[in-house]
Image (cartoon, rainbow, N blue to C red):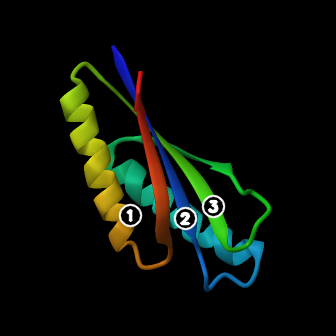
Amino acid sequence: MLIAALQLELAIPWAMSLKDKRRAVKGLKERIRHRFKASTAEVGDLDLWRSAIIGVVLVGTDARVLEGCCRKIVDYVEEFPNARLEDFALEII
């Protein structure tokens, strides 16, 4: 069993409150869950209005498949209109 842990660092420059930020983050998390069948959670910058860190986890048996799926998630987040991807980190355990 292999676990892919992807950390996404996002900027949300248009957010004027935590409510705005949480609306954007919730929408992105739900879309990732439904499209890629991955587990998601907001894991950092919880009290900052204009940034967020989202954790995404996948489980599988092939490292190349997991890495490819994570690359697709990164590409998807780069196209997401309500947040800007600043950085990401991938670890396969």
Q: Residue at x 40, y 59 (%)?
A: 31
Mark 2, residue position: 10
10 Å neighbourhood of mark 2: few (<14), some, or many (≥20)?
many
Number of the label disc, if any, that sits on residue 52: 3
Q: Can residue 35 be seen from the camera position used here?
A: no
Q: Earlier in the sequence, mark 2 or mark 3?
A: 2
**CA gap, disc 3 and disc 1:** 13 Å
Mark 1, residue position: 77
The disc labelled 1 sits on which kind of residue? Val
| Residue 82 place in picture, x, y as percent | 49, 77
**CA gap, disc 2 and disc 1:** 9 Å
Q: Nearer the viewer, residue 29 or 78?
A: 78
Local secondary structure at mark 2: strand
| Residue 39 place in picture, x, y as percent | 46, 39
Whether tag 2 and tag 1 are in contact, CB under 8 A, the answer is yes
The disc labelled 3 sits on which kind of residue? Ala
Q: Earlier in the sequence, mark 3 or mark 1?
A: 3
Whether tag 2 and tag 3 are in contact, CB under 8 A, the answer is yes
